[in-house]
Amino acid sequence: MTRVEKTDLRREAGQRTRDGLQAAALELLAQRGQDGLTLREITERAGANVAAVSYHFGSLKALCDAAIEHALERYLDAQMKAIASLSPTATLHEVAAAFAGPMIRALAAGGQDLAMMRTVARVGIEPPQGWERLTAKFVQSRRDVLRVLTPHVPGVDEQELNFRTRCAAGMLNWLALSPIGTELAAMPAEQIERQLVPVVAGAFRGDTSADR
C-alpha cells in the first residue's frame, strides 16, 4: 500500500469518526436537548474515544453546534429541493406546501424527526457562532421562494414579500415548539397539510382586504 493510499484511508476513517460523533450528538440532542449531555454518552453511542471529540471539534459545545447546524442545513436543502421542483405554473397552495413540506413531514413522523426539528427551532432563536457559514444558503433559499411567489402577489415589493416569507418560516418554527404543534403531530400527514398549508399561503398572500 502506498503512502498516498494510507493517507486516504486515514482521512476516510477520520471522516467516519467525525460523522459518527455528529450523528450520535444529533440523536441525543433530539431525545433530551443539551442539558446534561456528556462527552462519554456521545462517544459511547458513536463507538469513539473521548479524545476524538477534541480532535475533530474542539469541545462538546462545538460538537453540538456542528450537529445542529448540520440538521438545519438538511432542513434548508429539503426546502430548497421542494421549491426547485415546482413547475412554472405552480399554484400558491403548491408553493406553500413545498415551503412547509419538511416541517409537515417532521410533525407527521414525530419521534426523533420532530425532536430534532424542535432542537433546531429552539437554537435558531439565538444562533451559535459559526452559523454564518449558512448565510449564503439562507439567502439563496429566500431568493428561490421569492421567485415562485412573486407571480402570485402582484404589486407586493421584494422587501415586503421577503418579510412575509420570514414570518412564515418563523411560524413554522414556533409550531415545532408550541402546544398546537403537539396537536398537529397527532394527525396524519394529509390532515396536517390540510390544516397548515392554507395558513402558510395566507401569510404569503397577506391581508389585502383594506385595499379593496
Image: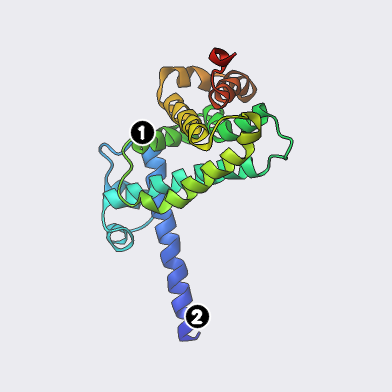
Give the residue at x 49% y 49%. 137
- Above or below residue 136? Residue 94 is above
- Above or below residue 171? Residue 209 is above
Give the residue at x 63% y 38%. 148
Q: Quadrant of residue 13?
A: bottom left
Q: Which residue is mark 1?
A: 122
| Residue 130, percent from left and from top | 33, 52
- Above or below residue 58? Residue 25 is above
Can the viewer see residue 46 in this picture?
Answer: no
Q: CA distance from mark 1 to mark 2?
A: 43 Å
Q: Quadrant of residue 3?
A: bottom left
| Label ID, residue 35 | none
Q: Closer to the camera, 124 or 135? A: 135
Amino acid identity at mark 1? Arg
First in sequence: mark 1 or mark 2? 2
| Residue 177, percent from left and from top | 40, 26
Q: Residues within 10 Å of mark 2 (few under 14, many from 20)?
A: few
How many tags in the picture?
2
Query: Left or right: 16 with respect to 52?
Result: right
Question: Which image quarter is the C terminus in?
Answer: top right
Amino acid identity at mark 2? Glu
Can the viewer see residue 139 in this picture?
Answer: yes
| Residue 119, percent from left and from top | 38, 36
CB atoms of marks 1 and 2 within 8 Å: no
Q: Closer to the camera, 105 or 10? A: 105
| Residue 38, percent from left and from top | 27, 45
Give the residue at x 46% y 17%. 180
Secondary structure of the residue carrying tag 1 is: helix
Give the residue at x 38% y 55%. 47
Secondary structure of the residue carrying tag 2 is: helix
Foreground disc of the pair 1, 2 = 1
Q: Which residue is mark 2?
A: 5
